[in-house]
Image (cartoon, coloured by chain):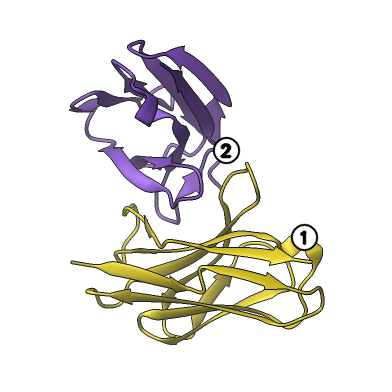
Amino acid sequence: GENVEQHPSTLSVQEGDSAVIKCTYSDSASNYFPWYKQELGKRPQLIIDIRSNVGEKKDQRIAVTLNKTAKHFSLHITETQPEDSAVYFCAASGYSTLTFGKGTMLLVSP
Amino acid sequence: SQTIHQWPATLVQPVGSPLSLECTVEGTSNPNLYWYRQAAGRGLQLLFYSVGIGQISSEVPQNLSASRPQDRQFILSSKKLLLSDSGFYLCAWSLARAGETQYFGPGTRLLVL
């Protein structure tokens, strides 16, 4: 089955800096890659996703890039703000259910 | 628009007691439904998923079971809770095809004492 590795497990940045979270996947058949943000005590919420026919997608301060050849995808957050502090999960899906990474705790200090 | 409900929001149960958590979805038909468990500070563990009424796939062996008595209702049960069953239980739905976004419910926080 699919295996998704996510790095780093924790990431601390200063407000205004950029943050990058990276994921790799194992199943070359995977073609859908969502990213979720989970604030403390809340449900995970979709923040951005990308499909395999696209290499990059941007939504304001967040962007996702996908390299299908290398089987990795990344989340980029620019101009980080304290409210970006949360746990971020990547996931991959092909013909079955989503497989999630173990999460990255992002801490943005004012 | 679609909404997903879970109840109860929080639950404190003694070891050995039964469990029933309920999830319902509104605004869509024939969704795929999922149960996840999240231990404190940990990732999302898929427990069960269902592609239709009465169709349940189990991802991990445990003392939990799931049922889907109606199209938009998903129930997580246990006959005897263990301490290790404590956690944050999340129900999710997606459209009924591969490679679709999953949308999570508000979750049930379960503490087994």
How far apart are the two marked residues, 1 and 2, measured between alpha carbons? 19 Å
Residue A41 position within the rendered picture, expressed as x and y whole percent measured from the top left: 51, 49
Asked if B99 appears above or below B3 in the picture, the reply is: above
Q: Is residue B51 left or right of residue A63?
A: right
Q: Is residue A21 left or right of residue A47?
A: right
Determine whether the residue tagged by mark 1 lies in a helix, strand or loop: helix
Quadrant for the N terminus of chain B in the image:
bottom left
Asked if B94 appears above or below A35 in the picture, the reply is: below
- Colour assigned to chain A in the rendering is purple
* Disc sitting over residue A108 in the figure: none
* Residue A8 appears in view: no
The structure residue drawn at horizontal position 27% and vertical position 26%, both measured from the top left corner, is A62
* Chain containing the residue with disc 1: B
* Number of residues whose C-alpha sits closer than 10 Å to that of mark 1, classed few (under 14), some (14–19) or many (20 or more): few
Q: Nearer the viewer, residue A108 or B83?
A: A108
Residue A50 position within the rendered picture, expressed as x and y whole percent measured from the top left: 27, 36
Q: Please name the amino acid that badge 1 sits on.
A: Ser
Q: Nearer the viewer, residue A96 or A78?
A: A78
Q: Which residue is mark 2?
A: A102
The structure residue drawn at horizontal position 52% and vertical position 20%, both measured from the top left corner, is A11
Q: Are marks 1 and 2 in contact (CB under 8 Å)?
A: no
**Which residue extends farthest bottom?**
B69
* Chain containing the residue with disc 2: A
Q: Which chain does yellow denote in the image?
A: B
Please determine if labels 1 and 2 lie on a single subunit: no
Quadrant for the C terminus of chain B in the image:
bottom right
In the picture, residue A39 is in which quadrant? top left
Q: Please name the amino acid that badge 2 sits on.
A: Lys
* Residue A53 appears in view: yes
Q: Which residue is mark 1?
A: B84
Residue A3 position within the rendered picture, expressed as x and y whole percent measured from the top left: 56, 40
Determine whether the residue tagged by mark 2 lies in a helix, strand or loop: loop
